[in-house]
Amino acid sequence: MPVIFGKAPGKIILFGEHAVVYGQPAIAIPVLNVTATARVTPILGTEAGKVHIQAHDIQLDTLLSDLPEDHPLAAAIRATLQEITPNHTPAFTIQLDSKIPIAAGMGSGAAVTVAIIRALSAFLGRPLPNERISELAFEIEKLHHGTPSGIDNTVVTFQKPVYFQRGEPLQTLTLTQPTYWVIADTGEKTPTWETVADVRALHDESPETCDTIFAEIGQITQEARLALSQGDLDRLGSLMNRNQALLQDLQVSSPRLEKLITAAHEAGAVGAKLSGGGRGGNMIALVPREKVSQVENHLLEEGAVRILTTILRETAE
């Protein structure tokens, strides 16, 4: 039996983080130049049921049977086995590798989960459709984030820019011209579940205030959808800046994020904001094509530890 691979990209949220957990829409895009990969290899000449997991990025080299039920990697493997072969587990090794920054709002956990499900279901002879992969990954996301929105598993599974609202049908976006997005990593690692929990606590303390903020973010996201489809950079930039101000009100920004956001504006970005859970991780800037290098260089000068630039290209109906 050949080695079977599964891959999934990173993702970045353009609009709507945190508010999406409370029923508002969000827009997110895949970041195809960073990926998570799962490789499944059969183990010959050993007893059925032996599953060896290697994830060198997190210094993990162990058997599935030695991991607790709520370990995210183990849960993804067990959920896939239960879905396809509940009464029989062949012996195999699964090797995991990810180039997606961890705890940086880029969907690293969801991408690893999707890569596992994609590779393992193919190895077992029944590749799962994207809809089911996303559903299973959403259940695993609860272990990562507690109360996930569902946007991470959706974007990295379908690998398309999406307009997402919990409980509503998935909507992919139609774009008429390319846009350029510079992503800068602050180097600060803050797990998404922490900021999600803190925003929930803030909402419990001041529900009316928070609901007003969430509703305004939702309106911004709806307007951004139209501006993005039309390629209206000035409008998009203005909406990003408004979204960032509201995220500040939710207390999820940080001094380092603010420094990089300011630097992006200084170098020519038309809009910039944090992306993801906040309090570290990444900021994202919308940049005219001719100023991409200028913005990249200035962000590095101002302390960004990593730069990724992704192009959101035209899409067909």
Image (cartoon, grey):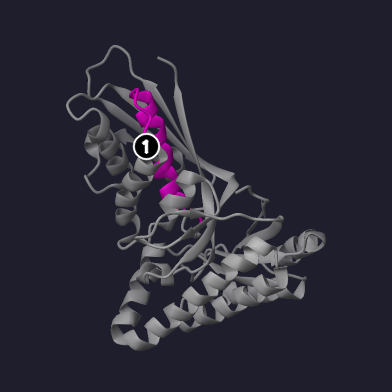
Which is more toward the observer, 41 or 250? 250
Residue 121 belongs to the span the image colors magenta = yes
Vertically, is 167 above or below 16? above
Q: Is residue 238 left or right of residue 97?
A: right
In this view, the residue farthest toward the top is: 45
Q: Which residue is mark 1?
A: 117
Q: Which residues are magenta?
A: 106-128
Residue 126 belongs to the span the image colors magenta = yes
* x and y, in percent, of residue 131 in the image: 38, 43
Residue at (26% x, 39% y) in the render: 79
Q: Amino acid at mark 1?
A: Ile
Where is the N terminus found, in terms of image quarters?
top left
In this view, the residue farthest toward the front is: 317
Check disc 1 and report its element: helix, strand or loop: helix
Residue at (36% x, 64% y) in the render: 193
* x and y, in percent, of residue 231 in the image: 70, 63
* x and y, in percent, of residue 268 in the image: 77, 71
Q: Is residue 299 left or right of residue 132?
A: right
In this view, the residue farthest toward the left is: 87
Vertically, is 55 above or below 3? below
* x and y, in percent, of residue 32 in the image: 59, 45
